[in-house]
Amino acid sequence: KKCAITSSEKRITVRTASGRLSYPNIFVPGTQQNDDGSEKRRYSTSLLFPKDADLSALKEAVELAATRKFGADYAKKFPKFKLPFLNTSDYPSIGVSAEQFPTLIRTSADPQYGRPGVVDAQARSVNEDRAEQVYAGRWGRLTVSVYAYDVKGNRGVAFGLNNVQLLSDDEPLAGTRRMAESDFGAVPISGDASELFK
């Protein structure tokens, strides 16, 4: 449940604690809207953290990125500075208990750098032919790049999505279609089967 941080002079990378995926667009980039109304294609996923998750390394990385770019007094200099930790209670459509999963982060990656890598719990590669294994509600963890930005007066810290590790299965979250295999069992068919479904 802990995060792990790796830092160099140019790059800050964190392996997050485990959480539940939300709105994953891992194999096919989704469309996001910019502040100016234009659209961009991005690989992305949110990650919902349980209340007992240890996010100390992730918070340390955010502080490090902000301080490197803006100085230790960035919060005083920029009262509207945007931190990347969001309250799940502000997003009821996600479909989880905000008490059980109080914190979420959003991550994204530019398609020009390739899609994020995906592995299972045994670190075996998961490719497009098993894309159904990546769904909203599944447990997983991420490696993210932590970076500070200053764009048209908007300042803050964001998470770039690097790779995904899939962990245990769980109930799909709201708005996620169940797999057909979960809804139907095998039915023996012989002759006229109409009587089976009355």
Image (cartoon, rainbow, N blue to C red):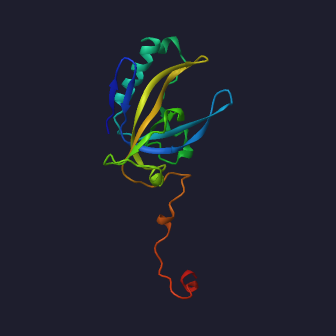
**Residue at x 49% of width, y 70% of height:** 184
Q: Is residue 122 left or right of residue 68?
A: left
State whether residue 195 is above or below residue 86. below
Q: How many marks?
A: 0
Residue 185 vs 198, above or below: the answer is above
Q: Residue 13 appears in which quarter of the rendering?
A: top left
Residue at 49 percent across and 32 percent down: it is 113
Where residue 46 sits: x, y (%)? 49, 39
- Closest to the observer: 172 or 90? 172
Quadrant location of residue 191? bottom right
* Quadrant location, the C terminus: bottom right
Q: In screen coordinates, is 3 left or right of 91?
A: left
Q: Nearer the viewer, residue 162 or 167?
A: 162
Q: Is residue 125 left or right of residue 197?
A: left
Image position, residue 162 (x, y; %): 43, 35
Q: Residue at x 58, y 84 (%)?
A: 194
Q: Is residue 123 left or right of residue 94?
A: left
